[in-house]
Amino acid sequence: MKKLLIATAASAVMASGAYAAGHGNEIKIGVILGFTGPIESLTPSMADGAELAMKEVTDSGKLLDGASVVSVRGDSTCVDAGAATAVAERQITSDGVKAIMGADCSGVTGAILTNVAVPNGIVMISPSATSPGLSTTEDNGLFFRTAPSDARQGVVMAEILLEQGVESVALTYTNNDYGKGLADSFATAYTERGGNVTISAAHEDGKADYSAEVGALAAAGGDRLVVAGYVDQGGSGIIRAALDAGAFDTFHFPDGMISAKLEENFGTEIDGSTGQHPGTDSPGAAKFTELVGGAFDATSPFTPESYDAAALIMLAMQAAGSAESADFKDKVMDVANAPGEKIYPGELGKALDILKAGGDIDYVGATAVELIGPGESAGNYREIVIKDGKITTVKYR
Amino acid sequence: MDILNAIVALSNFVLVPAVAYGSQLALGALGVTLIYGILRFSNFAHGDTMAFGAMLTILTTWGLQAMGITGGPLPTALLALPVGIAGTAALLLATDRVVYRFYRRQKAAPVILVIVSMGVMFIMNGLVRIIIGPGDQRFADGERFIITAREFKTATGLSEGLAIKTTQGITVVSAVVVVALLFWFLNRTRTGKSMRAFSDNEDLALLSGINPEKVVTYTWLIVAALATIAGVLYGLDKSFKPFTYFQLLLPIFAAAIVGGLGNPLGAIAGGFVIAFSELSVTYAFKKVVNYLAPENLQVDALVQLLSTDYKFAVSFSILIIVLLFKPTGLFEGKSV
C-alpha cells in the first residue's frame, strides 16, 4: 500500500513537471465572480465573455510572442468578503495569476482590492462593481472598472423617472455597499431635480417573507417603487410581496435586477415597469453579439463589460511588453482611450499587432469603453421598459 | 369612508398577515411545547424538523405534479402532506431510538438533552441541504388569491385594497382544524390522557401503569404531524428555504415560552402575541393615521416604531420581558 502511494505521488509529480514544461509560455488571469450567491444567474455568461477574449488572444498567438492565456475561475460569492479574499489570495500565491478580471459585487471587490490586490501589486479590472465608494479607495493605480460608478447611474435613473413624469417614489435597497451606494446617489440626484423620495428603506437578502418591508413602503406611498436589489435574492421577494399586497403596480429597476430571471419570475405582472443597466448601442455591442454567435447570452448585463475587462488586461500587457502587473498597470488607460486606432470585439489580434509595432490603439470594445478619472467607465446606459412580459429597449443614453 | 379605508389598510398589511403568521408560529410552538412537557427538554431541532417535513412534502408534490395530479384550486402540497408526515415521523422515531432513548435511560439532565438536540439540528439541517439544496423552492400552485387587492377595490369602491392569499386562508383553516383535533386527542382519548398524566407527574404516571415508551412514541408522532404541517404552511405562504426554517426557531421558542412552556393553549396564544407584535411594531402607520386624523392633524412622518430590520429583535425583547416578569409565561406553564 505504502509503495503504491509513493509510486502514485511520484508519477503525479513527474506528470505535473511535464505539464509545466509544455505550457512554459502561459499567462494566467483570475476570473473571480459570484458563481454562487445573489447574482449567480448573471455570472456564467460574464465568465464566458471574459474567457472568449482570452481565447481570441490565445488563438491569435500574438500576445508577448505567442503566450497562451489561461483563465482561473474563482467564486467571489458576491457577499462573503472572507471567502472572496481567500479565493483571490489562493489565485495569486498558488495559481500565480498575473491579473484579476473581477470581482463582481462592490463589497467583495473592495475587500479583494485592499486585502489582496494592493499588497501583492496585482491589477484588477472589475466588469460590474459599481459602488461610488470604489472611486476613492486607495488602489496604487491597480484598480479599474469597465462598469460606470453608481454615482452616474443614480443621475440617469433620476432623469428617466422624471422624464416619465414620476415625481414621487418609494425606494428600497439591498443592505450592502452596492445597494446603499446606489440608493444614496439616486436619492440625491432625484431630490435635486425636484423628485420626492417618500421612504428609503433597506431590505435584507435571503428572507422568506418581505410583507413587513412592503407594508412600510406602501404606507409611505409613491407613484413607483424603486428596487435597488438583486433579482436572485430579496429584490424579487420585495416585488412579489408588493404585487400580492397590491401595494405597487409598477417598479423601477437598476442593473442588479435586470435579467432573464425577472421576466421568468413576473412576466406581464410588472408591465409598464422601467429600468436601466449599463449598455450601449455602439457598433461594438452588435459585433460582440455576432462574435459570440449564440454560444452564450451576449446581451446579459455585464457580459460585454467582462469581455472588455479581460481584453484591456491583455492589451495593456502587450503595450508594456510584460505580463507583470507592476509594468502594465500604467498602460491600461493608454490602450482604453484615444488617441489611436479604434478596436472593436473580434479585432484583438489586430490590436496586438499595432501595439507590438509601437502604435497606439483606442479600445472601444463591446461597451464603448472610455475610462475616466480614477480608471472607471464614463457610463452608457440602456433604458428598458417591461412590455408584454418582456424586457424591451427604449433607448440608449 | 376614511375609517373603512384605515381598517382595510391595517388589515391588508398587519391583521391578515399576522393571523397567518401567528397560526404558523402557533403550530410550531405546539410541537416545541409538547416535547418540553412530555419529554422534558427544549428541542432545538424543531425548526429543521419542519424543514425536513416540508422538503418531503415538496418532493412528493413535484412527483404528483409530474404525474398530472393537482389539487385543482388548492395547492397540490395538501395532497402530498400525508407522505411528508409519515416520512418525518419515521425520521423522528429513528432519531429517538438512536439518540434520545440512550440519554433518557441515563436519566440525563435536560440541559444535556438540549445540547444533544442541537447536534440533531445540525444533522437534519445538513440532510435537508444535501437532498434539496440550500436555495429557494417554490411549490405553491392552484389559485393564488381568494381576493386580490384590485378586485377588492373595484368591488367596494374603497381606495385601499385588501388581498387575501389562498395560502393565508388555508393556513388559518388548517391551524384551527389541527388545534381542535389535538385538544380532542389530549382531553378525550385514553392515550391523550396518559400523555397529560405523564407530563404532570412522571413517577405517579409510571406507578399507575402507563407505558412510558408508548407515550414517547405518540408524542413524536404528533410532533411530526405538527412540524410538517407548520413547515408546509409556512413554505406555501412564504417560500421554502432551509435557512429560514432555522431562523424560525427564535420566534417559535419565543411563542412557546411567552405562552408558558408545556402548555398547549399558551403556545397558541404565544404564537399570535409574537406575530402581532412583530408586524405592528415594525409597521408604518402613516396611512392609517392620516385616514383617521382630521384635516389639520395630517402627519408626514412614517409613524413607524422600529425599522423592519429589527423584526427579530421584537421577539427577543418580548421573550426577555416575559422571562423577567413572568417566568412561567402568560398561561402558567413550567418555568424555564
Image (cartoon, coloured by chain):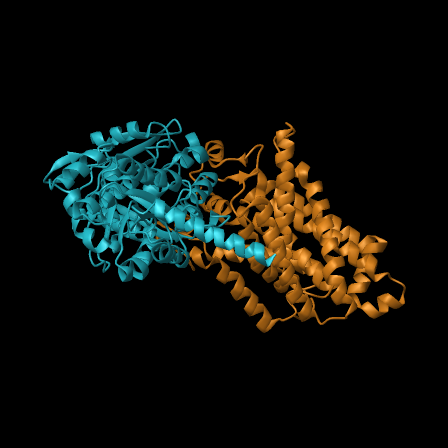
Q: A11 or B136, which lies in front?
A: A11
Depicted B154 relative to depicted B13: above or below: above
- Direction from residue A361 to residue A124 in the image, left or right: right
Residue A264 in the image, given as x and y percentages of width and height: 44, 33
Q: Observer-nearest residue: B35 or A332? A: A332
| Any part of residue B263 in sight | no
Quadrant location of the C terminus of chain A?
top left
Looking at the image, residue B293 sits to the left or right of residue B73; the answer is left
**Quarter of the image where the N terminus of chain A is located:** bottom right
Q: Is residue A75 above or below residue A354?
A: below
Q: Position of residue B253 (x, y in %)?
A: 61, 61
Q: Which chain is orange?
A: B
> Which residue: 19% across, 53% down?
A327
In-image side of B145 versus A261 (left or right):
right
x 68%, y 41%: residue: B81
Quarter of the view holding residue A258: top left
Is residue B24 in view from this perspective?
yes
Q: Nearer the viewer, residue B188 or A366?
A: A366
Could you tell me residue B241's position as x and y percent? 54, 47
* Chain letter corresponding to the colour cyan: A
Q: Residue at x 33, y 39 (%)?
A: A51
For the image shown, how many numbered marks are present on the structure?
A: 0
Residue B330 x, y percent position in the rendering: 64, 65
